[in-house]
Amino acid sequence: MELPLIPPMLATAGTLPPAAQDARWAYETKQDGQRVVVYLPGDGSVLLRARSGQDITAAYPELAPLAAALGDTPAVLDGEVLALDERGRADFQLLQSRMGLAHAPGRAAHRAARVPVHLVLFDALHLAGRSLLRTPYADRRGRLTDLALNGPSWSTPAALVGHGEQALRATREHGLEGLVCKRLDSVYEPGSRSRAWIKIRNMRSEDVVVGGWLPGKGRLGGLPGAVLVGQRAAGRLRYVGGVGTGWSEGERTELAGLLAAAASDVCPFDPVPRVPGARWVVPRLVGEVRYSTRTREGMLRQPSWLRLRPDLTPEESAADVPDDLV
């Protein structure tokens, strides 16, 4: 059966719905993986398309048996491909070793043996020849659950109706990326970023030491486009990433003056990071940054600048560098 091409619906960043409306929403764990739309024509084949529409089926050969699990019922399902770490948590860095192999099926099969993926399903868009796009989310979720698609490389986690505060707290306590809130009466809006779906990302904040910067481009010429930051561990300043967002125009200009006054020819990080075009400074400025998670190497993911910390010396700044980097 020929199935319609359906770009995925996207969530809007926001906060929990008002408490008075809590019972009108469902809550799902925000996954840290690659979004996919799964096409199952009912003929024993499976087609995976990325958010861009690209065919990525060959990158994930272990998901091919999903077609047999559904049988001859044609369907289009929405989900996310994850790579799980030893604790069973999604690890985007692990998944990156699997992404981009859609045109190299041999390499994909070899990598699958070392880094298997798991498909999490959370919506049904087309089922048994009928479009479900105008069907309320609660009913679509019920249809998906009825398919009982839980196998060795795929699952359909439950969605929690109501109790949003508890759900968000649980994701924070378990170190998960966040929460997606979905209005029970919402229809599926292909390709749209809708307020009917709200994503909440758990962010952390820490103090860092500024050790360098990268010049901005265009209208930011002469100003910092990003600052290079580190944290002290075992007597050394370890590089943990570059931060290029979070400033107002005035804050960026102020920071430019402070960096110019602290200019140095010596890189303060140990070991020296490979950052082409970096300009080094004496590591005396402390700032606070917000970020989502760390990579296995201790680098900050999705960092943004919060504020300068003139009340702290570099020695007083907190360090949370993974033990294996110390």
Image (cartoon, rainbow, N blue to C red):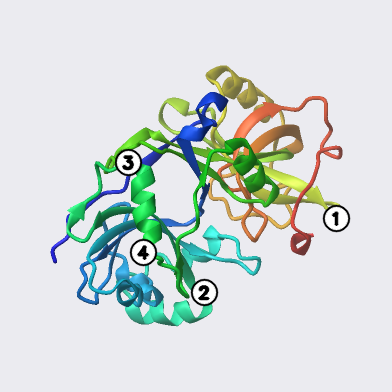
If you read the primary sequence from the N terminus, does the residue marked by circle 3 or circle 4 appear first? Answer: 3
Residue at mark 1 to residue at mark 4: CA–CA distance: 53 Å
- Crowdedness of circle 3 by 10 Å Cα count: few (<14), some, many (20+)? some
Answer with left or right where residue 110 lies relative to residue 294.
left
Quadrant position of residue 245: top right
User: Where does residue 310 sit, x and y in percent of width and height?
Assistant: 78, 25
Judged from the image, the secondary structure of the residue bearing numbered disc 4 is loop
Answer with left or right where residue 264 lies relative to residue 112.
right
If you read the primary sequence from the N terminus, does the residue marked by circle 1 or circle 2 appear first? Answer: 2
- Crowdedness of circle 2 by 10 Å Cα count: few (<14), some, many (20+)? some
Camera-side mark, 3 or 2: 3
Quadrant position of residue 209: top right
Residue at mark 4 to residue at mark 2: CA–CA distance: 27 Å
Camera-side mark, 1 or 3: 3
Residue at mark 3 to residue at mark 4: CA–CA distance: 17 Å
If you read the primary sequence from the N terminus, does the residue marked by circle 1 or circle 3 appear first? Answer: 3
Query: Mark 3 = which residue?
Result: 136
Disc assigned to residue 147:
4
Query: Mark 1 = which residue?
Result: 234
Query: Mark 2 = which residue?
Result: 115
If you read the primary sequence from the N terminus, does the residue marked by circle 3 or circle 2 appear first? Answer: 2
